[in-house]
Image (tube, grey):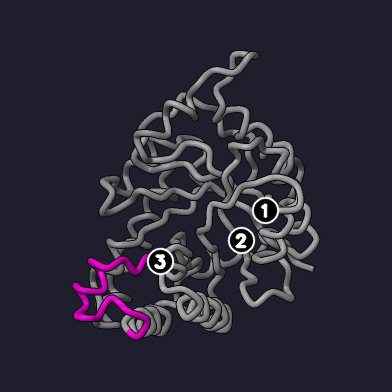
Amino acid sequence: METFGARLHRAVRERGPLCVGIDPHPGLLARWGLADDVRGLDRFVGTVVDALGDRVAVVKPQSAFFERFGSRGVGILESTIRQLRDAGSLVLLDVKRGDIGSTVAAYASAYLDPSSPLYVDAVTASPYLGVGSLAPMFELATAHGGGVFVLALTSNPEGASVQRAATADGRTVAQTVIDEISQLNAGVQPLGSMGLVVGATIGETGHDLSRVNGPLLAPGLGAQGAAAADLRVVFGSSLPSVLPSYSREVLGAGPDPAALRAAADRLRDECRAVLAAG
């Protein structure tokens, strides 16, 4: 069984360092001339999958924008996941789940068990009930070749008050998260399967990412204010592990499929140049 880290390493090598988020919020649906309903959601997602599924390394559907339409929206999410996997993209489901005991185990089963209709390559997770509380996710991901991206240093300004708070040993909360994920990836080749989320807008972090040995998802690029060049400042020597993530910067080019592909190609090439130079 191939690990998620190995699949990601190969996908980035073959398709380039780019993750595209699918965030079908009402404003974007309107911009595409679509109604804010299940039919509009289905047309929007279908266009994105057809345009990008066979050329982007990772696609990241944001679960909330599907869940808001109830069971029919979740049904479209299930279909989207299948279509993306069939097209060869890795699917990172942005759910940011975090809980304890049997509940986090149930979340793990929902997204990381191959028998689930929502089975994906990797998920995002929140560590703020303790990184150890996510153990069922890590274990199931390892058992089935999946990945988990844990929030560490996020782009939203409110995050700093928690993430940069000092713990009893003097490390920040974020550094403790970074260090615990680093331990899970120790010695894994070519890349560990447990990643971190580090926002591209935060500037120089003051945190040590050098031992993570896993993927570093960098949201905040494009519409949220960061440019590809900012990745050098945020990640420094850890640039080779960065997976840049764009959503509206790509999706805003639609609904023309050729324009979506052109936007994705341009951003992928910009990021490749920055990461290679680092």
SS assignment at label 2: strand
Where in the figure is residue 255, as x and y percent of width and height? Answer: 25, 80
- First-in-chain label (3 vs 2): 3
Dots 3 and 2: beta carbons under 8 Å?
Answer: no
Rendered position, 269 above or below 42: above
For disc 2, the neighbor class at 10 Å (few under 14, some 14 to 19, many from 20) is: many
* Magenta extent: 23-39
Spatial separation of the CA atoms under disc 1 and disc 2? 9 Å
Q: Depth-wise, is mark 1 or mark 3 nearer the camera? A: 3
Dots 1 and 2: beta carbons under 8 Å?
Answer: yes
Residue 24's label in the rendered image is none
Rendered position, 257 above or below 96: below
What residue sits 44% from the left and 29% below the top? Answer: 205
Rendered position, 93 above or below 183: below
Residue type of the residue flagged with mark 2: Ala
In this rendering, position of residue 22 left or right of residue 254 = right
Quickly name the residue at label 2: 122
Q: Is residue 54 visible?
A: no
Spatial separation of the CA atoms under disc 1 and disc 3? 26 Å
Q: Quadrant of the N terminus?
A: bottom right
Quickly name the residue at label 3: 65
Where in the figure is residue 210, as x and y percent of width and height? Answer: 59, 33
Where in the figure is residue 60, as x and y percent of width and height? Answer: 47, 64
Out of 151 and 202, give the one closest to the viewer.
151
Q: Depth-wise, is mark 3 or mark 2 nearer the camera? A: 3
Residue type of the residue flagged with mark 1: Ser
SS assignment at label 1: loop
Out of 214 and 139, give the one closest to the viewer.
139
Rendered position, 202 above or below 277: above
Quickly name the residue at label 1: 193
In this rendering, position of residue 107 left or right of residue 209 = right
